[in-house]
Amino acid sequence: MSGSGVRRTTWAALRARRRALGRLAAWSAVEALPALLGGALVARAVDRGFLAGQFGTGLAWLAGLAAAVLVGAAASGRVYRSLGAVVEPFRDDLAARVVWGALRDATRAGGRADSAAVARLTHQVEVVRDTFGGLLLVVRGFLFTAGAALLGLFALAPPLAGAVAAPLLVGLTVFAASLPAMVAHQRAQVNAGERLGRSAASALAGHRDVVACGAQERVVSDVDRRVTAQADAERTLARMAALRSLSLGVGGWLPVVVLVLAAPWLVRQGLSAGAVLGALVYVTTGLQPALHAVVQGVGGGGLRYAVTLDRILRTSPPPGPAPLPSTRPATDGAPATDGDAGPATRSDAASSPLAAGPPTRTGPAGEAGSVPPAVALRGLTFRYGPHARPVLTDLTLTVAAGEHVAVVGPSGAGKSTLAALVAGLVPPESGTVHLAGVPTAGTAPQDLARLRVLLPQEAYVRTGSLGDNLRYLHPGVDDATVLAAVRALGAGPLLSRLGGLDAELDPAALSAGERQLVAAVRAYLAPAPLVILDEATCHLDPTLEATVEHAFAHRGGTLVVIAHRISSATRARRVVVFDGDRPLVGTHDELLVRSPVYRELVGHWEDVAPPARVPLGRP
């Protein structure tokens, strides 16, 4: 997006609100009455009143000026009301654009939530709103006020109008010629600030790796270079203020000097003293303030407007032809779809993945009818930054359809990262992820939601009825199926305590374990064949946790559990343990022999000494 994009967006916003702009122009014309009449009324008050010895007549002309000022002041209130009718809808359009872009990026395959979108919404959009309004004010103020002053000056003394207009045009030309350079330096200042922020954030996030690698001096030097670059950009931008001062000096103060120096000659040429004074009034109370306002407004707020709007247009593409997407990945207990666009009920065997089973595909040897694995990871590598230590390195793992797998390891080893990669919520640095033969990269969120559901540790519960919460991933499911799921997962007591499926929920009134149980029933009802539990039962007691995992294991489909207790690993068919650089895979008994980390975890979870290593050969 370039400066032309900013211009197109601005003109489109103005054209879309032509009626409001018309009202703004009409009230601005009324507001400019003092600028139009001020010099002429002062000239008459002096020539026909005070210099002619008619003091009352002079006061009467000044009273007319006071009346014009009052009318202009009344019109100013209408100006601001009309301004809001232009600015606020533009702000709403930009906010919708930012929100749409953030939702699109967060819900696409491999996408992630963009925290910078909050800054764009709460800060950058407001900057654009404020500067857009300020620009409209100063530009229309200059056009109407300066135009009225020049018109009044021409009516008073045409030669004076030419003498004043010439330096005014020169000042405006100097300012207009310097605007491109000002915009470039303003953009450089914004970019330098963003680069400094990214550099500092990267250094803070990876400080452990920096210390471990002994790279403190290198990282400090890099951040210091960014600080210096931003300071240089700030100083360059400050120096550009000299051009604004030059424009104001030529266009605003030079006419005053010309009038003062030429006053004796003008009087000798027959111009009255009142006309000279009126010309000074036009220049000092009309032209000069209007020029000062437009130069300072465009040179300050205008630059911020152009650069900030350009940033929004670059980072937030315009919404597509469809409305804001209602589909979301089935994560954090949130629905895959909303309303009538949701998945089919369990009775609709043709569209339910659990009822219909995984799709039939051609196997490696080309035979039709082979069932692809539920999860296939190939050469998966992931790290949380270009210089961070890899969390996963060249991981290859296959989970067969219908298999029950547990993932264990120390805190921070990468278990939740693996769950997010499998769910397609984050893209790997290298390698591929396939769910039922479908690559997560490039797959639409609603299609991924039909393949898997991820339950994180912090369960999502929304306001509304309990039944609506439980049907969130499967809106059309009947009450009998919902109640069967409630019984299977041991949620009957919670259902009774809350008052049944029609009971209204207050998420803040539920405990963490109750929220996890609601989310578990919701995921159990989801039509997705793959369920990923990322410590999703950590707030449940061991008995209820076993009930939930047993229900999911017999639900049909595939189950991957990020284990919170060792009992989750003993219930699984296979266990993946993060042991060193590469995870190990095996049964519970096999890993007790092969993995010191697994033996230590078993001893920690069971609160007993780790079992002795069995002297068997490594499989």
Image: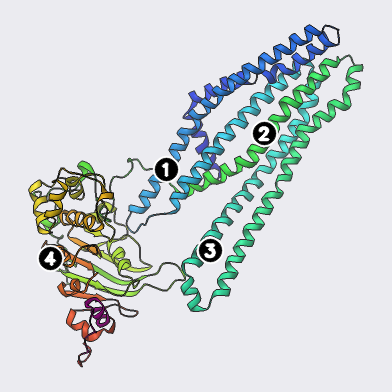
Q: Would you say residue 599 sits in the magenta stretch?
A: yes
* Secondary structure under the numbered disc 3 in the rendered image: helix
- Give the residue pinned by disc 1: 97
Q: Which residue is mark 2?
A: 293
Q: Nearer the viewer, mark 1 or mark 2?
A: 2
Label 3: few (<14), some or many (≥20) within 10 Å? some
Quick check: 424 left or right of 501? right
Cβ–Cβ below 8 Å for labels 3 and 4?
no
Amino acid under label 3? Answer: Ala
Q: Tell me the residue that label 4 is attached to.
A: 550
In the rendered image, residue 272, in percent from the top left (x then y), is placed at 86, 14
Q: What residue is at 73 percent from the left and 31 percent from the top?
A: 169
Question: Residue 367: x percent and y percent?
Answer: 13, 68
Task: Specify the amino acid type for callout 1.
Answer: Arg
- The disc label shown at residue 200, or none: 3
> Looking at numbered disc 4 in the image, what kind of residue is underneath it?
His
In the rendered image, residue 607 lying in the magenta stretch gets the answer yes
Residue 594 numbered mark, or none: none
Are the residues at dot 1 and dot 2 in contact (C-beta closer than 8 Å)?
Answer: no
